Structures are given as structure tokens and as C-alpha cells.
Image (cartoon, rainbow, N blue to C red):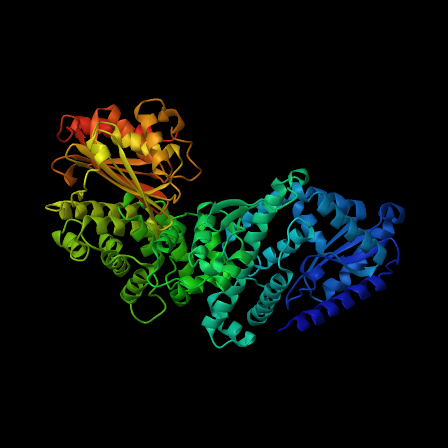
Amino acid sequence: MTAADRVTRTAAADALCAKAYDDAGGPDTGVALVAVGGYGRGDMAPYSDLDLVLVSDEGVAEERGEWWAEFAGQVWYPLWDTGMKLDHSVRSLPEMLTAAGADVRVASGLLDVRHVAGDPNLTLRLRTTILAQWRRQARERLPELHEMVRNRHRLIGELAHLSMPDLKEAEGGLRDATVLKSLTATWLVDVPAADLERCRVHLLDVRDVLHEAAGRATDRIAPEFWTPLAEGLGLPDERAAQRHVRELGRRLTHLSRLAWRRADDAVRRTPAARPRRPELERIAAGVALSKGEVVLDKGARPAQDPVLLLRAAAEAATRDAVLAPPTAARLVRECPPLPVPWPDEARQQMVRLLAAGRGLLGVWETLEETGALARILPEWERIRLLPHASVIHRFTVDRHVVETCVEAAALIRDVSRPDVLVVAALLHDIGKGGLTEHSVAGAPIAREIAERMGFAADEVELVAQLVRWHLLLADIATTRDPDDPATIDALTEHIRTPEALALLTALTEADAKAASAKAWSSWRAGLVLDLSRRARAALQQGSVPPAFRVEEIEVPPAALAGGVSIEVEPVDEGARVTTVAPDRVGLLADVAAMFALRRVPVRAARVWSQGDYGVSVWDVADEFLDAGALRNQLDGIAARRVDPAQRLAPRPAAEGELAPTVVVRPEASDHATVIEVRAADRIGVVYQVSAALAGLDMTVRSAHVSTLGPQAVDVFYVQEASAGALSETRAAEAAHTVRAAISPE
């Protein structure tokens, strides 16, 4: 089946319809027989309907009366007699325009109107008027059309991932190809015409073969049709046929999503509001934002920056913006390969990308379509477009993995190592596609990838452990007697630390939610979470997290004299700032405010008491800091000439932002009360926490501040100002006060 066959079928249908029109005595002026829909586009499959409209000039029906009513029947009856399915209507030109104005589906469908018989000038007027009306009303009509498209996608699913793909109605199917042509006709957005037409024509070829194999009109590929599809398309086997169809669907989905993002942006921007020059907002080194798309900044040097591709992808995903495909393609061509192991920034940007939530989907799609993913993660080819054997899965393996990352991003508050969680989510099914059980096959692959990404040895083993045992918790919870002591032993035999158990629990939940609603029913969730809770209790007996490590430093003369010492040391893409001062309640809050008021992003910090002095070491993302300016800022805060409280109040939560959590860890220390704070990574969190504690006359004896992906994880070892751990009541008061201080209003 080829395009030539469709041309032949369309020509034969045209001849049949034209003969019926002529035999009925159809006039040469004032009336036209036109084809619409797939027939209008010339996309006739072996069992396609004939979509026809008999159009007349205004007043023809009234003038010709009875003849007009009889004439329409005389056109349709010969066509019915052939056995072909006929979808027909009779309309005047004004009625056609009114229908198009009232229904966006009609308006979009009439863009494909094609002359078959009768008055060609009438058909031309219809086409040009409909097209002009479509372009004139595009800004008002496109939101309605987009909502219809989204509803269809939610109802049907995505062609690339459905177990029984629908070639027409699914996302990435023929209906979307038609909508894309309608979008292009508005002149508001452009779509790569050659790419679109290639995918559309190949999907039409698939449908032609499917009709012949089924012996009827159908758009759904049932399992029994994959083999005849492979034979009819000249492909080696069923797997190749599935891959071919799913790749076409994925490409059309990618084109559709990009086009709609740009169309929505064009609708929001009125003609008067459009800038004369492209707007470029610099958002990271070498990366800028332009009209909702992440592109390269003017000063970008891809050939000198191997991390630029990941940085651009992470920025796009965290902002739920489009990673411009030409930008991604250029970075693939020009960026040097990442060194092995990856530099710290590359790993951090990968974590930001994976932990971005729903923004990951479109960006990952662009990385795959532009060949970028093959450079970042060559092992991805193992699972790309691989169907799941289990019917419980709603996606192919690769899409399921991305969905697992999206679900895991919502659980990063529950684990100590969100970076390990999201990487394990990415790799948990990497072993599929072979004969060996996929968790067994995947563990060594995951270990190799984690090493390449630059994780430390213990982190590499943790990733590999999670991949190896990612099915264990759910399997035991749903198949073993919960009251049997051996049930807990079966889990703790392989998962031996509370940290690993928390990560496995989160991964299990993310994996199940990404599979389907049935995989994480309330029943299954209750069994899994209850087993995890009891296993954690078993593991924590005799298990205490390591105490905060204190480092002795030489106290500088300025601090010995009762003042403040601030030293700035340049490091890769930032600076390390060391502060030393006589210890006091509120010192940490003042130092944290110093950075926050100067809008300096903090990557990590260590804080401890050393005798009578408070010491803090801060890694910040600002390589141009001046120690003198910092000291002046801190002096103003300490002397209360500057009040940071109002300027650093929590901002309103962004859409989709996780709520902050504050947890007291009584088991973590014998000499202090440990308070763990997790919140969105934003300037001012450390100040808000430490100021709240200072307001309760509590002192922070040590602290560990870190940023893991999109969240800040800050641990504070707190004592009463008079020394000693907090009482249970005071610990609860501290947690409540801190939570209130960091919660967005």
C-alpha cells in the first residue's frame, strides 16, 4: 500500500461521484459537489467513507423548490447502490459559513474541502471564505480547539504507548496530523511541513494495510494484526512493526505538543503586545528564555561547555518550558562529550531535570527526538518504545520510566537522598528487553551509569540496590503473611538500612502510580506502607544516624578580638565563604540573612560551634563576592540597622510546589535535638529557620545545609541556650514555629 494507491482510490471515487452528479443533471453554475474530511484530503483507505456535501449558492433551494430536493436524492442513490458508505449533507454557502462559525470542528474540517463536480467557482469561494474566516477568528477559536484536542487525548491515550493503538483518534495519530495542518493555516504558528507530511503519509500506509488485514474499516491495531502489518509494510517482524508505528506516533505527538505550546503563546500575545525583537531573558550560564522556550544566550559557547545541554534541559523542565528543538540539536552537534565521570554540575543538572515533575515529559521528548538522549544516556536504546508484557501497564517501558520519575518528584520530601531516588526511578527498568529477569539484569547497568554520572561509591551501590530490589517490597507485601516474622526478615535481608528502606518505599509508590491506578490501589498501598513501617521499626533498633562531623579550624585574629572574620575563596562556578565570630544566639540567622539579602544562592553549608566561636562554611553560586561588602552587610544586620524579616518573608507557593516539612529526629543525637527541614530551594529558607529558633532562645550547635535537585534539605542540631537537648514539649514548639516561619502564605 502506497500513496499511489490512495491517489488511485481517490480518483476512482471522484469519477464515480462526478458521474452521479452529471447523470442527475447537476448544473454547471450555482451548485457544487465537494469532498470533505479524509476524502477531501485524498486519504482514501480501502474501506473509507465518502464524505460529501452538496453546496448551493444562496437562494438556489428556494428558487428550484421540488427539483432541488429530488436532485440531491438522485446524486446519492447511485453512490449507495455501489455499496460504499456515504456520509452526506446538503447546505447552502451561507449555511456552510454559519456552521463553521458555530462549531470549531466544522471550521477545521472545511479547510480540507475539495471540488468534485459542478461549479468550481463556488467551491473556490467556499474555500477562500472559510480560510479567511479561520484566520480572522483564530485567536478566539484555538483555545476551544485545544481543549477538544486535550479531551480526546485524555479519553483515548497516546498512540506511542497504547497496547492497542488507535491510528486516528489517539494522541499522535491522524486526527492530530489534521489539526496541525489547521494550526499552520492560521499563520500564527509554523510546523515542519516535510516532517509532518512524512509521518502522516506513513500512518496512512499503516492504516491501508490494517484495513486489508481486517477486511473492514478500523483504526485500532489489535494484537493479531501486528504480524500482517509487518508483512504488508515489508518489515522483518511484529516487534519492528510496533516500533515503526510507535515512532511515528511519538514524532507526531512531539510536533503537536510543540505547536500547541507556541499557538497558546501566540494567542496570549496580542499583536500590539508582540515585541519588535525577540525577548531574551538570561536564566543560567549560556541559557536564556524567549517566548516560553529555552534557547541559547548570546554569549553561549557550546564548544567549550559540555554541561550546557543538561543545563538547558534542566532549566526548561523546572520551568515547564519548551526546550527549543533547534537549540537541542545544535547542542548535540557542538557540545563536547561529558567527561567520565561527569563533573558535579552535570550530575546536579541531571537530578534537577529528573526531579522537575510534569515539566520533564516534554523536555525528555525533545532530548530523544533530537538525538541528545543517545549522548547523555546511550543505554536508553534498550528500552525505547519497548512494549510492556504486563497489561497492568498503560505505557511502553520508556514512557513508564519517565512517568516514574514524575511520580518520584512528588515524593522527594520523604527521603534523605532525592538525587538517588530520581536516578533509581530513571534506571529501575533499564534491564528490560532481555531474557534475564529485568531487576537482576538492570542492577549492573544501573551501577555503571551511576558511576559514569559521578556518584560516590556508596551512592552507586545504593542506586544499584534499589534497581535490583525495586519489586521486592510490593511483592512481599502482597504475597506474604504480614503476621509471620519471616515476612520482615525477607525484606530486611536485602534492605538493611532505614535510608535504603525509605528510598525503596518511595520508588515502589512511584513505580506503581506510573503503571496504572490499579497498581496503587488503596489496598495495595496500605499493605506496602504498613510493611515498610514495621520493617523500619525493626531496622531502627540499634541503628542511629551518624553524628554531625565537626572540623577544627584556626580562629582568625578578627574573631579572637571579638569581631567577625569573613574569608572568600573562589571555587568552580562559585565561591566558598568561611565566617568565624563569637558564638551567640541568632548568629546563624544573621549570617544566613547576609547571603539572602544579597540574593546569593546557597548550594551547601556546614555550621558548628568550636569552643566559644561559631563557624560556618558556605558554598555559594556567586564567584564575584567581596568579603568587605559581606562584612558591611552583616554588621548592619547584627546592629539591627537592617531588618531582614520583612524582606525575606516566605513568598507565595508556586503552582505544584510541594509543601515544606519539618520533622524532629529524637534518635539522631544524644546531646542535641535534631530538626530536619525540607522545602523548595529558594533564597531565605536557612534564615527563616534559624531566626525562628533564635526567637525561641534556642541555639544551633551544628547544621548541615544542602540542595538536592529542586529542594533544600537542612538539618539543625538544636540546644537550649543554657545547653542541653530540648524537652519533648520544646521540640514540638520548635518544629511548629519553624514550620510556620517557612510556610508560604
Residue closer to the observer: 629 or 343: 629
Q: Position of residue 698 (x, y in %)?
A: 20, 27
Which residue is at a point 58% across and 59% down the rendered structure image? 168
Residue closer to the observer: 121 or 294: 294
- Residue 740: image quadrant is top left
Quadrant where the image shows the C terminus: top left
Quadrant where the image shows the N terminus: bottom right
Which residue is at a point 13% across and 29% down the rendered structure image? 723
- Residue 141: image quadrant is top right
Q: Position of residue 587 (x, y in %)?
A: 25, 30
Residue closer to the observer: 593 or 164: 593
Residue closer to the observer: 728 or 28: 728
Q: Position of residue 14 (x, y in %)?
A: 76, 66
Q: Is residue 334 above or below residue 525?
A: below
Check the image and name the residue furthest to the left: 542
Q: Is residue 143 above or below residue 158?
A: above
Q: Is residue 206 visible?
A: yes
Q: Is residue 410 left or right of residue 326?
A: left
Query: Count of labels shown?
Result: 0
Q: Is residue 284 left or right of residue 502?
A: right
Q: Is residue 165 visible?
A: no
Q: Position of residue 270 (x, y in %)?
A: 65, 39
